Amino acid sequence: MIHGLTGTGKTRLLQLLDPAIDLEGLANHRSSLFGGLDREPSSQRTFESRLAQLIPTLGEDEPYFIEGESRKIGRVFMPKPLAMAMKQAVLVNIHCSLATRIERIIEDYPVTDARILANIETILKSLKQNMGESQVEEMCRLLRNGELRELVRILLLDYYDKRYGKSMREYRYALEISAENLTEAAAVVTEFRRSLAR
């Protein structure tokens, strides 16, 4: 199971691995505060149907890859048997530089029109209780001025890393690797999986 801080490229890495379950793809939601931007999230029925169609294709002989997720992904819930199975997973933690994380998020969440810009500002304003009014106002100013790298830097360091970093440190990882180069990371993780299947 692939773990990593926001922006490390977990979903990108998963797309280079086989066999894999892309829960965010099945849910059509990136499972983050901004995960539903410019997407129509799947219904529970559609999500479960897609998952049920995928699982038989994975094979039974070797481990498959999956991203560490909470049970709720957007507006759908992971089936309990899968959530329970994930508690027994072998954990892989990926990491990369803050600069790389910022660039990946900017690429993955393009601000392409005024509607998306307005949606992002609405989401930012919902963070006042977590981050304080003055910091949220500063982030909205950065958004309106197109200073996206600084906006993402603040979100990563002052929201996402504080929110998820502590819980991630409580896990025991069987493998920790750099994801600066995702192709190289995929090769390392694939070989690690082979070693588990032997």
Image (cartoon, grey):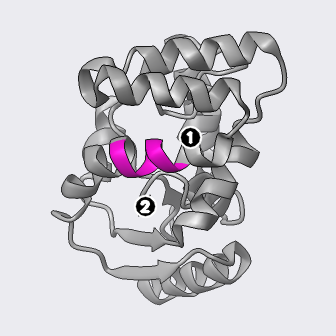
**Residue at x-position 51% and y-position 50%:** 153
Q: Is residue 7 left or right of residue 172?
A: right
* Residue picked out by circle 2: 4
Range covered by the magenta-colored residues = 153-158
How many angstroms separate mark 2 from mark 1 (CA)? 20 Å
Is residue 162 or residue 54 the one in the foreground? 162
**Residue 68 place in picture, x, y as percent:** 40, 51
In the displayed structure, 122 sits above or below 78; it is above
Query: Which residue is farthest left?
Result: 170
Rendered image quadrant of residue 17:
bottom right
Residue placed under numbered mark 1 in the picture: 151
147 or 109, which is in the foreground? Answer: 147
Q: Main secondary structure of the magenta part?
A: helix
In terms of depth relative to the viewer, which is nearer, 40 or 139?
139
Whether residue 74 appears in this view of the structure is no
Q: Position of residue 124 (x, y in %)?
A: 48, 21
Q: Residues within 10 Å of mark 2 (few under 14, many from 20)?
A: many
Viewer-proximal residue among 74 and 116: 116
- Measured from the top left, where is residue 111 in percent x and y? 76, 29
In the rendered image, residue 85, in percent from the top left (x then y), is placed at: 30, 49
Is 8 situated left or right of 25 in this image?
A: left
Q: Earlier in the sequence, mark 2 or mark 1?
A: 2
Check contact, mark 2 vs mark 1: CB within 8 A: no
Q: Tell me: residue 65, above or below residue 87.
A: below
User: Which quadrant holds residue 53?
Assistant: top right
Q: Quadrant of the N terminus?
A: bottom left
Query: What residue type is disc 1 on?
Result: Leu
Q: Is residue 89 visible?
A: yes
